[in-house]
Image: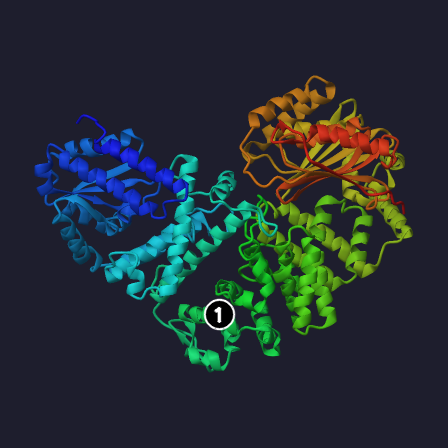
Amino acid sequence: MKKTDKHPLLILQRNRNELISSFLKGKEPDFLDRHARILDDYFINVFKKNPAAPVSKKSCAIIAVGGYGRKEQCIHSDVDLLLLFEKKVSEEADDLVKEIVYPLWDIGLDVGYAARSIKESLHIAGKDIEALTSTLDARFICGASHLFPDLMKHLREKVILKKSNKIIGSLVENNMNRHKRFGDSTYLLEPNLKVGRGGLRDYHTMLWIARIISNLTRPRDLEIYGYLSHEEFHALEKSLSFIWNVRNRLHNLTGRKCDQLHFEYQTDLACALKYNAKNGQQPVERFLGDLHSNMELIKQLHMMFLYEHGYTTKYQRKIKQTKQTGIDGFEVIKDSLSFSSPEKILQSPDLLIKIFEESAVLKVPLGYEAKRFVKEFAYLVDDKYRVSTSSVKSFEKILTTFAPTFNVLNEMFNTGFLVHFIPELKAIVNRIQYNEYHIYPVDKHLLRTVQTIKNFGTSEDTSKDRLYGNLYNKFTNTNRKILLWAALLHDIGKKDPAKNHSQKGAEIARSILVRRGYKSEEIETVSFLIEEHLSLIKTATRRDINDEETAISFARKVKDKERLKMLYLLTIADSMATGPKAWSAWTSTLLKDLFLKVMNILERGELATKEAVSAVEKKKEGVLSSISSSNERQTTETLFNFMSPRYLLYTTAQDILEHISLYKNLGNADFVWKIIKVSDSNTRTVTICAKDRPGLVSKIAGIFTLHSLDILDTQVYTWRNNIALDIFKVNPPLDQIFEEEKWAKTEKDLKFALSGKLNLTKALDKKISAYQTAKPYTLERPHRIVLDNKSSSFFTIVEVFTYDSPGLLFKITDALFRCNLDIRIAKIATKIDQVVDVFYVRDFEGQKVDSKKQIDKIKKTIEQVLTVYGSQFTVKLIWEYEASSYC
């Protein structure tokens, strides 16, 4: 067929382009429907002009199936067709496909088709759940019109009615598996718009089940048939419209079918949707907050739909109720808690919070009718209600009761009751922290933190550390209540990002608890926990926890053993609830080590100098007693004179013996090392004994980077006989099957680097250029360099806050070396989406850094090496210097 201006394909292209252009300008609210109709027109026109049309009209029908059948045609959605024949697929089917489908492929549309008879279609739908749901969405376009109603009639009679329960069970089970695979999109910062929990597929599942049960023909029937209330259906329509708008713009942005909202697209989408900065939130953060809110609504309606029609999150149908309530005004129906009548709520408004308390006690969820009533009557929760003794006691019961199967606080949030009860929470609902570190919105993070603490010591505890459960289970009821209040409110200060959220949160929490009549000591403890909820993790990951001065300083801050225990558990739960980049076995080890050291000081008091000297002497005696040869004992006593007091105090007797053994094996070699597997934290301790030389730490760090060995922590000791003992904590090689080979290659390259045979800078530049990878985009934060002369009496602490990149540690340590600084301790920590490299340094003369000239040189030198993913750029640098303070 010759292509003129009136050719169906050209008309289709022109109409699609105009429609998409109009949509992108915000002028096409009914884009999905119009897009589907434009495609319909193409098929109708081509079918009419097809040479075989007279025959086709009698024997074949063109049916839209799947998303095209539902008229949910996004910009790059698939176009799925069924060429339906009555008894046998005609020989002319191939010609029809060539005429209709091939041109669409030529212009880049993803068209899928199947040519089947009615009998074949029914057979496949009966065996394949995806084929069945696709057919449930079927819509007649053109052709033999009598075939479509015949197909749908036989589908219902021969497939659906015969095994409807089994089909619905499969749909629910598939849903459950899909949620496990793709996650809860209402929680994630890179949600899947279609198949994640709260995505479009949850809505489709509701539609399919309703069609199976009630033979629905259109989405509006969800309201007409009573599946959703008028308000719920209206809210659903608004949420779907928002998500489809986002999905279409994502398709346009990526140039393909795409449902995963990756970081790299989010800022552009926020801009396209005309979001502006407001209330301290960036446009992208406001956009993601709205997206999560709309997906949360779909998630809740989906859960309500399944529960009210007798299906739990598992695919089995619920059969019997097992629990009853003894409280007047409530009843248990179908294993869910309900109000006996709405009039009861008006008579006793305290039932609004009591129903959540009873839910926690009975471990029975609220029914969805009850949730509707909570939303409807939430206006009854006024200031007097919030501070009443009865309401406060009920909330304490909810807060502290362990409910393993579901989170009652979640239900309070989802119904809006919790925000009515604690209005200060409203500012952080669906508030996004746009970085790679926090993977949950603030409100969801707070709920996860509370639940994580309540899980300690139970079968739901994923930490695998009995210490947490032992500590929590030994708390008094009062201390549990205090800890959980702190967990619920610890990030409430993030409503104002311009202020220190820990301090602001402590102020807000104090106000909340004062109004509710808590004792002053309880209020002060909650405020302390919130204000200091980051201090333990910062100290553990950024300071030398082997230095007694660190533990003493922290013990002076905490003052009380019970406070320390609560702060420790809050820190653990906060980290676990933040995301995988905030919690690891190594972080766990550091926190526990610091916690035990501080607890020891609080129990025994601060160690005096005499005790330290006594401890060193006992350690020396222990080392010597394990040596049988008198000559070796004499040699060891001589070596003691070369060892610094710090080394002798903080190194175990066993490690001292290992280090002496390494020293004896050193001979004329540049270095010797020993690698130990630390099973508890899945890390490696690499102890290197070498002849000291300028830049030794930098070279070792560079070699480890060259071999993709991530450094977690470094301790550097120098004996007075010019021997360096550098102790590195590192992550194991990625491929642990060939770990020995990896270490052998690393050892060989370190020898070459120390002998000058390997140009380390050149080798690293080559690796980094080959390593370039795309970085998920998050909001750029300024780089900071902080000099701290207060925290340590003997060292200047240099903190470099920057973005991670291959070879970063080598470049910073090399820069410090060029500033004539001797690195004694290095720690690698994480802060939001940045890394924090912390170095304890002294100059080559053994002094702290305190002159302006030295400071300026360090600033300039580090500025020059800071990079973002291998690309040099001019950084916005915040330079902080804390004045010297000598003890």
- Residue 714 left/right relative to 323: right
Examine the image and state in which quarter residue 514 appears.
Answer: bottom right
- Residue 478 left/right relative to 602: left
> Residue 156 location in percent, x, y?
19, 57
Residue 91 higher or lower than 306, as above or below: above
Seen at 16% across and 45% down, the residue is: 120
> Residue 543 location in percent, x, y?
75, 45
In the foreground, 877 or 887: 877
Residue 651 higher or lower than 222, as above or below: above
- Residue 11 left/right relative to 609: left
> Residue 432 location in percent, x, y?
56, 50
Residue that mark 1 sits on: 363
Q: Label 1: state its secondary structure.
A: loop
Quadrant (top left/top right/bottom left/bottom right) for the N terminus: top left
Seen at 29% across and 34% down, the residue is: 14
> Residue 551 location in percent, x, y?
79, 52
Q: Is residue 41 visible?
A: yes
Colouring: rainbow
Q: Most extreme residue toward the right, as rendered?
A: 610
Q: Amino acid at mark 1?
A: Lys
In the foreground, 653 or 391: 391
In the foreground, 430 or 578: 430
Residue 471 higher or lower than 813, as above or below: below
